[in-house]
Image (cartoon, helix red, strand yellow):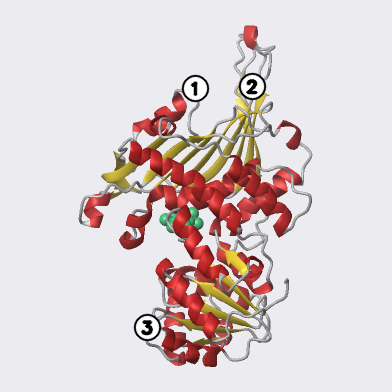
Amino acid sequence: MTQSVGKLLLFGATGDLAQRMLLPSLYGLHADGLLPAGLTITGTARSDHDDAGYRAFAKKALDEFLPADRKDESALGTFLDRLSYQPVDATRQDGFPALAEKVGDVSGGLAIFLSTAPFLFEPTIKGLESVGLAGDTVRIGLEKPLGHDLASSREINDAVAYAFPEDRTFRIDHYLGKETVQNILALRFGNSLFEPVWNARGIDHVQITIAETVGLEDRAGYYETAGALRDMVQNHMLQLLALVAMEPPARFDGTAIRDEKVKILRSLRRITPAEAPHLTVTGQYGAGAVDGKIVKGYDEELGKDSNVETFVAIKAHVDNWRWQGVPFYLRTGKRLPQRHSEIAIQFKGVPHSIFADRGGLLQPNTLVIRLQPDEYVRLLVMAKQPGLDRDGIRLREVPLNLSLDTEFAGTRRRIAYERLLLDLIEGDPTLFVRRDEVEAQWQWIDAIRAGWEANDIKPKPYPSGSWGPSAGIALTERDGVSWTE
Ligand code: BG6
């Protein structure tokens, strides 16, 4: 089913995600002429707006969240014309007939985007189904959180599957919409250079870091049910790991790529309760300073004591032939010193150094794929320092640098949701997460949580603006590995 729909229905249309990401993304697609000509967008949420009220709401959100160079009054006007609104309390079935009437005929295709609290998923699906908004021409996009463990994610997936078969279900992991994340595939499978060494013979270890400077951000209700492991590792980090580790798929399509990813997710070595204290580290930020500003600790922001982790570091392994003995170090946290997400692939050193007795020191090569804030791919290689070498040869690590910001300077960087919303509208499932992937992810995560509970592991405090608890650093240092910073 790769055919554009004529209508879009947005649940959670007044929420934070809609204001910051979805409306700006849809506007961006509209302004570039990428939305199907007659596509209408119906927003729905509990708040009471009429069409005009919602357009005013959307305009305010766009004023606030669109970058100045993207604002174009005439495009804004024609974009707002696409919008309409119908209030629905999804916990009650009686609002759905009016919603169906508002949306109208869906024979030309409807894409639904569900960005609501998970407890609303089931009644929403039932409501949609009961008024004919779940038929063959309708596909559904689901925003996280899709559960808090394997059992609850199965419940949600079952509730969705009651009305929507897997090929019409699009689970969102917004990291897959990021340009540099897709670039992992281009780099690995569009070049012959890397693949021969992309395995345990060539690679010493892999590091994946997602460091954030933000804290709780008014999301206490959600974050207290999640914590860093569920919020970041279960989804984004494991997807990155799968893209780095997967076997070459036969084709660039949703089935081939997701088949290979799920094999990796199922090959993750389960961390036992006995190993959890050694292979994982959790932390929670205390007061400190980030970006030159004094910030409160997590508990103080929350207004009560909590054992929810805002930092996690894990030493993971993929148990298959390609990756035997190669650690994958994962680290993510809030209130760290800088916002930076990157993957570092550290290759093995040379088998024998001809420079050793001439004073030359060698560093093993590292491939750094930087996702944000800047986007680049950098290969660190050894080069000779210019000179006559009277005191021995000097070598230095220097980067072979592919800056995507410079190389593709004329190409506008899009919000990840622009790509994902367009793929949802056009029905391309490649960058969405399949049910078997989600379940394999939860299985691995649940084992870690069970290990934390069995050992009564509580997050270690770390000052805001630091790189997390010192145990996070020790996790790699005891293997002779330093985190890239
Ligand atoms: C979301 C998490 O999925 O990703 C947030 O819920 C996190 O806690 C965000 O801040 C990070 O996304 P990005 O695109 O800013 O790296």
The percent position of residue 303, horizontal first and vertical second, equals 20, 56
Q: Secondary structure at mark 1?
A: loop
State how far apart marks 1 and 2 are (Cα): 13 Å
The percent position of residue 59, horizontal first and vertical second, equals 46, 81
Rate crowding at label 1 as few (under 14), some (14 to 19) or many (20 or more) other CA atoms within 10 Å. Answer: few
Determine which quarter of the picture holds residue 204. Answer: top right
Q: Label 1 belongs to which residue?
A: 480
State how far apart marks 3 and 1 are (Cα): 55 Å
Tell me the quarter of the image containing the N terminus: bottom right
Q: Is residue 432 visible?
A: yes
Give the camera-side residue of 427 and 190.
427
Q: Earlier in the sequence, mark 2 or mark 3?
A: 3
Give the camera-side residue of 93 and 204.
93
Residue at image position (65%, 14%) is 393
Counting every numbered tag in the picture gives 3
Q: Is residue 336 visible?
A: no
Residue 223 shown left or right of residue 325 in the figure: left
Label 2 C-beta lies within 8 Å of the nearest ligand 1 atom: no
Viewer-nearest of labels 2 and 3?
Answer: 3
- Picture layout, residue 227 above or below residue 31: above
Residue at image position (31%, 60%) is 220
As shown in the figure, which amino acid type bears the numbered disc 1? Answer: Gly
Q: Secondary structure at mark 2?
A: loop
- Picture layout, residue 255 above or below residue 3: above
Q: Earlier in the sequence, mark 1 or mark 2?
A: 2
Q: Label 2 belongs to which residue?
A: 349
Rate crowding at label 2 as few (under 14), some (14 to 19) or many (20 or more) other CA atoms within 10 Å. Answer: some
Q: Label 3 belongs to which residue?
A: 47
The percent position of residue 451, horizontal first and vertical second, equals 39, 38
